[in-house]
Amino acid sequence: MEPSELYGFDGLVSIYHHRRLGGAEAPAFERRIGVGRVSNVQENLLIQVTVLRFDPGQDAIWDRVRQQDAAALSDIRVKPTVAYRDAGLGAIVDE
């Protein structure tokens, strides 16, 4: 990923597949496809993410990512947030 101050080493991230459903003017749609962690911030500030969990039903897009399909890679978005249930805090936080 490109440099960003929003990501820190070992931080949790959500991974999304971003695409337009229709032509270029159609609204964008994002679907979460996994959860990961920032595994490295290089000297040049580029960011590496390790996928920790693949969301169910997203095998086709992950297969394209593994094959380094340029179109699939360009549709991947990583966000520096995770859902509460994915943070593993349920046992220590009393709602």
Image (cartoon, rainbow, N blue to C red):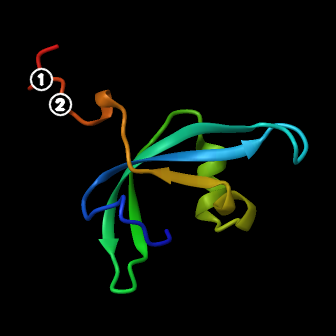
Q: Residue at x 58, y 62 (%)?
A: 66
- Quarter of the image for residue 75 reads bottom right
Query: Whole-percent x and y of residue 41?
Result: 33, 74
Residue type pointed to by label 2: Leu
- Quarter of the image for residue 38 reads bottom left
Which numbered disc covers residue 7?
none
Query: Whole-percent x and y of residue 62?
Result: 59, 51
Q: Residue furthest right?
A: 23
Query: Whole-percent x and y of residue 78?
Result: 49, 53
Q: Residue at x 31, y 66 (%)?
A: 39
Q: Residue furthest top?
A: 95
Left/right of residue 55 with respect to residue 23 in the rendered view: left
Report the number of numbered marks: 2
Q: Of helix, strand and loop, which one carries label 1? A: loop
Left/right of residue 73 with respect to residue 88 in the rendered view: right
Q: Of helix, strand and loop, which one carries label 2? A: loop
Residue 67, compared with residue 25, is above or below; it is below
Which residue was labeled with disc 2?
89
Which residue was labeled with disc 1?
93
Left/right of residue 48 with respect to residue 55 in the rendered view: left
Residue type pointed to by label 1: Val
Quarter of the image with the C terminus in it: top left
Q: Are marks 2 and 1 in contact (CB under 8 Å)?
A: yes
As rendered, which of 58 and 38 lies closer to the eye?
Answer: 38
Query: Whole-percent x and y of residue 22?
Result: 88, 38
Left/right of residue 83 with respect to residue 67 in the rendered view: left
Marks 2 and 1, Cα distance to the nearest angstrom? 6 Å
Disc 1 packing (10 Å; few <14; some 14–19; many ≥20): few
Disc 2 packing (10 Å; few <14; some 14–19; many ≥20): few
Q: Residue at x 36, y 32 (%)?
A: 83
Q: Residue at x 63, y 39 (%)?
A: 30
